[in-house]
Image (spheres, rainbow, N blue to C red):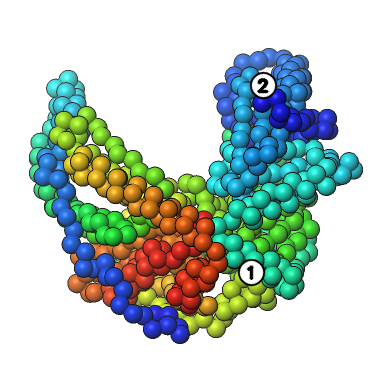
């Protein structure tokens, strides 16, 4: 890959074994979807009930299409949640998602600017939480992992905090020692 | 508290405040006032009189506010190496900025301060513009002295004492590199950049009024003119509208040239010991200094017009909060128009190995060409063909033409994708190339990566392919359709660099 450079063995991210989301994540996803879908159906039904003109045109197509959409989306949710997975390595966190476009995002802990744990009412009821990790330059959160158990979220956050503190401590130690230490570091690099 | 030596800025700073707030009012306030303006235009009868009153009231309010702001504005440099600012009229604010958090100290010389030899001293805090502290109307010497003070303090506090020594050594030996652009060149940037569109967008709210006016005053006359001159062969009305459009575009281009001249007038760029210094500007000589270590990625690009003019635009991006690192961003260093020789010259200063002509770029896989051709050339052309047949309006020739054109574009875009990795003195660099008719190179150091992402569809996995995107603190770089093994290797190595390089990425 590099000119003048022979690559040694690198830690390979293809070998990461992803951990599935919390058991209740699927239920949460389905409920979340239904919470949007049922009111929509109710509104459509109400329109059909009160507006005969609309009902004549749209009733049959809606009656056929809506259940199909419902079934497809519920199935899609199952596949989508199954395919999602998180993994922590020593220095970074990996997240896999996507049904059609499968993405694997890896974020080094040293690049995490701040973390957020987000819990909606449903998530609080089910003991779930979403973890959001932000790094520099991104528009929104770099990693937005929904459907983790709240405890897992807290563990990950704590792990990252510890990691950052440790890195800072090492940095400070480096500052106190004089140039010699750094010289040897650089020669390792070069 | 008593010990703090609070100072006022010179009374001339009042001019700065007036200009500043007037500008802010026009920039932020006008859109909010739009509803009132609509009411004004439609409802008020004696427009001229009330308009004058409104302007007068606004002007007086501006003067009073600026004066009050000036009276409340105090600053203080503490022994703890902090800049304290007290400001605000209705809402008092105290801004505390530690020297260590100051990224750059920039000195700007607005034209109205020139005869007084006063300048604005701008402290750039890392990342955010709201945290920027400006001391208006200080003497040049004082600003220079402050800058020295801040930089000296930062230097003593720097973590890597020895690298500083190295830099100091270099300062004495390394000659200062210099690049100047003539204003004729700068004007070309106006042609190349899309500022014309921005200028048009700014006019958008007034479009209706303008069109009304145009129709009454110009189009009708033009129409009769064309009718007399060209006769009835051509539709005179269409010709008239076309002329107007041409005029609008011309004005927009002129505005764009003007804007680029205002921004980059008498452009001077210096590079010494890993630090850029740029001075430019017509109304305000703005001095920007950027350290190469802080640069997250360098973009070298050439759009269609730039290609015709044989010029490039080079941009050095610093970390941005929120990814809005456009050409307008204050944090990015822009070299607006460079010919290929100057590009090489700048590359030589920054990365001696970087010679775009000789780099041996690796391309992406052919599957991308096939996929894009299917989706972006064949499908739309087929749809057009169906429309032709069903609608019975156009012949199939159009569908064929569109197929040819789209295929050409798809092929160009496929050919442009390329990547190149290089190791130089123990540092690892990536160069990503993309574009279609235009071309864009992005150069970055691998360890500055923020996160990596691989993307693949079912068919891509079958074919052993992966797309790759690396997020930098100044935006994302993307390469589609690499061999999966290759993409994985790039990701692994980039992560390795990000996790094990001890240098700070910021």
Q: Residue at x 24, y 45 (%)?
A: A155
Picture quarter containing residue B467?
Answer: bottom left
Chain containing the residue with disc 2: B
**Residue named by callout 2:** B89
* Residue nearer the viewer, B120 or B463: B120
Q: Mark 2, mark 1: which one is toward the viewer?
A: 1
- Are callouts 2 and 1 both on one chain? yes
Q: Residue at x 16, y 48 (%)?
A: A21
Identify whether A151 is placed above or below B39. below
**Residue named by callout 1:** B166
Q: Position of residue B294 (x, y in %)?
A: 56, 58
Within 10 Å of disc 2 (Cα), the crowding (few <14, some 14-19, many 20+) is: some
Picture quarter containing residue B160?
Answer: bottom right
Identify whether B464 is placed above or below B266. below
Q: Position of residue B388 (x, y in %)?
A: 34, 60
Q: Residue at x 71, y 58 (%)?
A: B278
Identify whether A87 is placed above or below B428. above
Question: Of helix, strand and loop, which one carries label 2?
Answer: loop
Question: Of helix, strand and loop, which one carries label 1?
Answer: helix
Q: Residue at x 34, y 52 (%)?
A: A163
* Residue nearer the viewer, A27 or B303: A27
Q: Position of residue B436 (x, y in %)?
A: 48, 68
Horizontally, residue A96 falls left or right of residue B322, namely left
Horizontally, residue B423 falls left or right of residue A77, namely right
Chain containing the residue with disc 1: B
Within 10 Å of disc 1 (Cα), the crowding (few <14, some 14-19, many 20+) is: few
* Residue nearer the viewer, A85 or B242: A85
């Amino acid at each position: 890959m590099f000119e003048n450079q022979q690559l040694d063995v690198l830690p390979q991210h293809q070998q990461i074994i992803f951990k599935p989301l919390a058991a209740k994540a699927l239920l949460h996803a389905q409920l979340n979807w239904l919470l949007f879908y049922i009111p929509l159906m109710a509104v459509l039904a109400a329109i059909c009930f009160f507006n005969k003109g609309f009902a004549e045109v749209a009733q049959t197509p809606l009656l056929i299409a809506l259940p199909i959409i419902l079934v497809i989306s519920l199935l899609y949710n199952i596949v989508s949640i199954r395919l999602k997975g998180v993994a922590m390595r020593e220095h970074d966190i990996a997240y896999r998602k996507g049904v059609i476009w499968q993405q694997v995002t890896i974020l080094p802990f040293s690049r995490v600017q701040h973390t957020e744990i987000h819990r909606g009412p449903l998530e609080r009821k089910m003991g779930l939480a979403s973890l959001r990790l932000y790094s520099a330059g991104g528009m929104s959160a770099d990693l937005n992992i929904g459907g983790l158990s709240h405890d897992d979220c807290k563990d990950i956050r704590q792990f990252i905090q510890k990691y950052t503190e440790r890195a800072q401590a090492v940095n400070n130690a480096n500052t106190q020692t004089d140039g010699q230490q750094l010289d040897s570091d650089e020669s390792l690099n070069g | 508290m008593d010990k703090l030596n609070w100072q006022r800025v010179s009374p001339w700073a009042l001019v700065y405040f007036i200009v500043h707030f007037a500008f802010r009012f026009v920039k932020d306030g006008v859109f909010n006032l739009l509803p009132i303006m609509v009411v004004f235009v439609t409802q008020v009868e004696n427009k001229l009189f009330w308009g004058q009153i409104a302007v007068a009231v606004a002007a007086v309010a501006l003067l009073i506010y600026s004066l009050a702001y000036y009276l409340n504005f105090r600053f203080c440099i503490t022994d703890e190496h902090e800049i304290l600012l007290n400001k605000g009229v209705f809402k008092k604010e105290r801004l505390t900025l530690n020297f260590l958090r100051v990224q750059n100290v920039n000195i700007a010389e607005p034209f109205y301060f020139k005869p007084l030899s006063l300048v604005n001293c701008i402290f750039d805090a890392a990342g955010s513009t709201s945290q920027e502290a400006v001391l208006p109307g200080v003497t040049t010497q004082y600003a220079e002295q402050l800058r020295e003070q801040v930089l000296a303090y930062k230097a003593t506090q720097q973590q890597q004492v020895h690298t500083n020594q190295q830099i100091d050594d270099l300062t004495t030996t390394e000659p200062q590199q210099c690049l100047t652009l003539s204003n004729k060149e700068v004007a070309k940037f106006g042609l190349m950049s899309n500022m014309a569109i921005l200028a048009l967008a700014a006019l958008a709210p007034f479009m209706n009024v303008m069109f009304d006016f145009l129709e009454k005053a110009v189009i009708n006359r033009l129409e009769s003119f064309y009718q007399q001159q060209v006769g009835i062969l051509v539709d005179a009305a269409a010709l008239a509208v076309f002329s107007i459009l041409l005029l609008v575009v011309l004005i927009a281009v002129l505005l764009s040239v003007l804007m680029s001249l205002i921004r980059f007038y008498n452009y001077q760029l210096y590079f010494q010991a890993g630090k850029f210094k740029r001075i430019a500007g017509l109304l305000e000589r703005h001095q920007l200094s950027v350290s190469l270590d802080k640069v997250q990625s360098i973009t070298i690009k050439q759009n269609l017009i730039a290609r015709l003019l044989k010029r490039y635009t080079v941009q050095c991006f610093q970390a941005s909060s929120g990814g809005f690192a456009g050409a307008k961003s204050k944090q990015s260093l822009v070299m607006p128009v460079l010919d290929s020789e100057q590009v090489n010259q700048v590359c030589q200063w920054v990365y001696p190995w970087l010679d775009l002509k000789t780099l041996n770029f690796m391309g992406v896989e052919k599957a991308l060409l096939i996929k894009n051709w299917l989706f972006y050339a064949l499908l739309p052309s087929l749809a057009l063909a169906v429309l032709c047949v069903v609608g019975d309006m156009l012949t199939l020739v159009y569908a064929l033409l569109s197929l040819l054109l789209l295929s050409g574009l798809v092929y160009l875009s496929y050919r442009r994708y390329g990547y190149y990795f290089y190791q130089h003195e123990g540092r690892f660099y990536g160069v990503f190339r993309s574009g279609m008719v235009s071309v864009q190179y992005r150069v970055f150091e691998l360890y500055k990566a923020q996160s990596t992402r691989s993307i693949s569809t079912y068919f891509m996995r079958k074919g052993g392919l992966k797309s790759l995107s690396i997020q930098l603190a100044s935006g994302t770089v993307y390469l589609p359709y690499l061999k999966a093994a290759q993409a994985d290797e790039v990701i692994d190595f980039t992560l390795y660099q990000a996790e094990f390089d001890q240098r700070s990425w910021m």
